[in-house]
Amino acid sequence: MAKLSCSYMGLDLKSPFVVASSGLTQSIDKIKEFETNGASAVIIKSLFEEQIRNEAYHISQKEAHNTSYPEAIEYIQEYTRKNSLEKHLNIISEAKKAVNIPVIASLSCISNKEWEDIAKKVESAGADAIEINAFIIPTSRTETSEEIEQKYIDILKTVKAATNLPIGMKIGSHYTNIVRMVDQLKAYGAASVTLFNRFYEPDIDIETLQITSSEIFSSSSDLRRSLRWVGIVSGHVEGIDIAASTGIHNGEDVIKQLLAGATVTQLCSSLYINGAEHIQTIEQSLLKWMDKWNFNNLNEFRGRLSNNPSMDQQMFERAQFMKYFSEH
């Protein structure tokens, strides 16, 4: 039987199936179920900087009679922060006791404040690595792209300086030059990059005139968002692992991302929809395909169709539907 083992962020994994950070990974029972069904690692539900701030704000509003006292506001903010962090650390330490696969912490940052202390505590709790889940919405008319990108670098540098754990960056696709950004992250010590984060996206309900949330779960059609860039980045930036994320729902999706150069694939929506047992279905599909092509391990075909000089680079770099629209 073909071997599915691989190395990711310096961690030895039994397969390329990593459970992405989500509500599913804040349950110890679920984490155990994922391991039983073939997951090679789990990423704990993110500790959100925005959530900590919002919780502190809402508590302070409920205690409006106290908010005129600066000391009271500071106490509420500190209490909320400690409570949220304690829950996150407990899940990490409990998961480490419950399973034998790597447990990766996830920090969702919008700045580099306070994360030095949190990174140290996450390491002490037993995490095997940290994935930084960062997305900064550019809303200022005067802030340059270089200044925004520097914020991501600063977050990475802050966390990297505070811990000996391997650090990964989970980023979005909103960069002028994704290849350069990944190269910069690698230069500042990132062991991996996840392409791409699936962010909350707003929608508008025209019946109620309210801002709502768009579709939460991905579909296989969303795979195209990352497949191009997994192929391009893997072909141009050496020395950094790539986790493919969003739109991975079946074995075929996994195979495509590995061929493009992904080190591992992150599963999320497909597990919400189909349950933990779906990992076994994906694994069998991958093994059957490898047997068909006589591949004995992942390294024999990983990156075979990446955007490297030996391949037809136009297929990844083409931006327009030239052939289709010239014939229809």
Image (cartoon, rainbow, N blue to C red):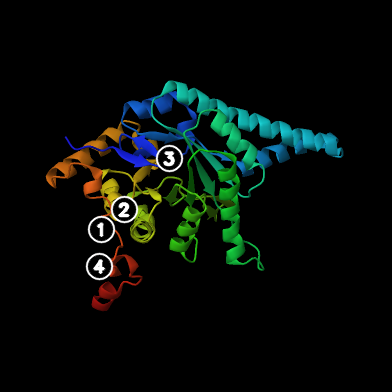
Q: Is residue 266 above or below residue 203?
A: above
The quarter of the rendered structure image containing the C terminus is bottom left
Q: What is the secondary structure assignment of the residue under circle 4?
A: loop
- Residue drawn at x 49%, y 55% as measured from the top left: 187
Q: Nearer the viewer, residue 229 or 102?
A: 102
Mark 4: give few (<14), some (14-19) or many (20+) Cα within 10 Å. few
In percent of width and height, residue 81 lies at 67, 34
Q: Pointers 2 and 1 in contact (CB under 8 A)?
A: yes
Q: Is residue 239 above or below residue 44?
A: below
Mark 2: give few (<14), some (14-19) or many (20+) Cα within 10 Å. many
In percent of width and height, residue 55 lies at 67, 37
The quarter of the rendered structure image containing the N terminus is top left
Residue 173 seen in render: no
Q: Pointers 3 and 1 in contact (CB under 8 A)?
A: no
In percent of width and height, residue 301 lies at 22, 50
Q: Closer to the N terminus: mark 2 or mark 1?
A: 2
Which amino acid, by three-letter code, is at mark 4?
Asp
Question: Residue at label 4?
Answer: 312
Which amino acid, by three-letter code, is at mark 2?
Gly
Left or right of residue 211, residue 289 in this image: left
- Residue drawn at x 18%, y 44% as measured from the top left: 290
Q: Which label number is shown at residue 305?
A: 1
* Label 4, label 2: how far apart the Cα atoms are: 15 Å
Mark 3: give few (<14), some (14-19) or many (20+) Cα within 10 Å. many
Of the residues tagged 2 and 3, which is closer to the observer?
2
